[in-house]
Image: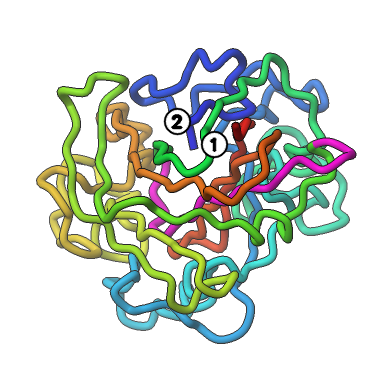
């Protein structure tokens, strides 16, 4: 999530800046190790699986067009039962592996978790970290608001937005259980991409949303509408990131909206410059006060859940 401004985005300076979904938070370095940085796309839970049986509506799949024999690599990943996978933090853990990789192992330098799904070990949970110059966004009860997120590396999946009222002990008391009590509804069936704040770049399309088989029951989730290339790697190995020679995971909702994003060749032309926007309905029954908005992205290609949080004042 990049909008409303997230905790990592000091003063809201980065916001909707094109190609900057990872652009905030680089001032946060952990353990004096320049390889362990709290950029906005590095707060997540690594190597987590769905709980129980798969409950996903097949139309919500994002990595079904893969090679024969590869289904076992995705069948237990978080999207297959949206919201059920256990996560370390509702706002993300820096590096994705707060207890080591594998758990209990000593920390190594830099991205020391690469053999175990990348990221780094022993980073803090976002709700327990002191971010600087956090922006608070004001929402009114009952109004329709916008939220948006960007993709650096596309792992398919689906996402949900949730609210939690800040407890007496402050944000350190935030829990996933609290956020699951107030999942937000999307206010319409439309979503759109836009480049920065330029309204002339808006391209709308119909969202694919579901309330079936989700956790908590009845919570509304939206399919990541950006298809990867066909195959388990999703285009990660493609030398030309602007094409999918073997086809797509599913049909793009609009021309040109597809791809892996960051790939093996670190080709800047592969990086997505847009933000994916949705309208959310603020419940009219909420008490006024200080809240936190949590974005939860459950992946299908990988065993990961990505989170970020924004401070919200309900009036």
| Residue beneath disc 1 | 41
Q: Residue at x 31, y 27 (%)?
A: 268
**Snapshot quadrant of residue 71:** bottom left
User: In the image, is 125 to the left or to the right of 14?
Assistant: right
Tell which circle, 2 or 1, labels the residue nearer the N-terminal end: 2
- For the residues labelled 2 and 1, say whether their Cβ atoms are less than 8 Å apart: yes
> Quick check: 221 above or below 309?
below
- Extent of the magenta region: 152-170
The answer to whether residue 149 shows anywhere in this view is no
Label 2: element kind = loop
Q: Residue at x 37, y 33 (%)?
A: 266
Which disc, if any, is residue 182? none
Question: Which residue in the rendered view is the most extreme toward the left?
Answer: 255
Please say which color scheme the image uses.
Answer: rainbow
Question: Which residue in the rendered view is the most extreme toward the bottom?
Answer: 53
The image position of residue 144, as x and y in percent, is 40, 41
**Neighbour tally class for label 1: few under 14, some 14-19, many 20 plus, Cα within 10 Å:** many
The image position of residue 23, as x and y in percent, is 49, 23
| Residue beneath disc 2 | 21
């Amino acid at each position: 999530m990049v909008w409303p401004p997230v905790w990592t985005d000091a003063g809201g300076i980065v916001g909707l800046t094109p190609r900057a979904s990872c652009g905030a938070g680089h001032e946060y370095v952990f353990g004096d190790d320049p390889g362990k940085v709290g950029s906005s796309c590095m707060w997540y839970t690594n190597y987590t699986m769905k709980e129980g049986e798969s409950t996903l509506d097949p139309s919500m799949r994002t990595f079904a067009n893969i090679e024969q024999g590869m289904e076992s690599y995705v069948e237990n990943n978080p999207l297959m039962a949206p919201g059920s996978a256990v996560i370390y933090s509702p706002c993300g853990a820096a590096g994705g592996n707060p207890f080591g990789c594998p758990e209990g192992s000593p920390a190594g330098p830099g991205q020391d978790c690469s053999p175990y799904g990348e990221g780094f070990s022993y980073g803090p949970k976002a709700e327990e970290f002191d971010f600087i110059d956090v922006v608070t966004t004001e929402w009114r009860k009952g109004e329709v608001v916008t939220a948006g997120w960007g993709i650096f590396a596309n792992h398919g999946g689906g996402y949900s937005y949730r609210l939690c009222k800040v407890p007496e002990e402050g944000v350190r008391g935030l829990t996933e259980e609290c956020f699951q009590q107030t999942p937000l509804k999307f206010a319409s069936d439309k979503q759109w991409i836009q480049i920065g704040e330029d309204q002339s770049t808006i391209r709308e399309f119909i969202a694919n949303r579901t309330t079936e088989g989700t956790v908590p029951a009845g919570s509304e989730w939206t399919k990541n509408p950006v298809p990867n290339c066909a195959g388990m790697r999703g285009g990660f190995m493609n030398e030309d990131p602007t094409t999918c020679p073997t086809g797509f995971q599913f049909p793009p909702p609009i021309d040109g909206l597809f791809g892996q994003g960051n790939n093996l060749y670190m080709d800047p032309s592969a990086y997505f410059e847009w933000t994916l926007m949705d309208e959310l309905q603020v419940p009219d029954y909420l008490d006024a006060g200080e809240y936190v908005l949590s974005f939860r992205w459950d992946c299908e290609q990988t065993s990961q859940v990505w989170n970020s949080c924004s401070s919200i004042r309900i009036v």
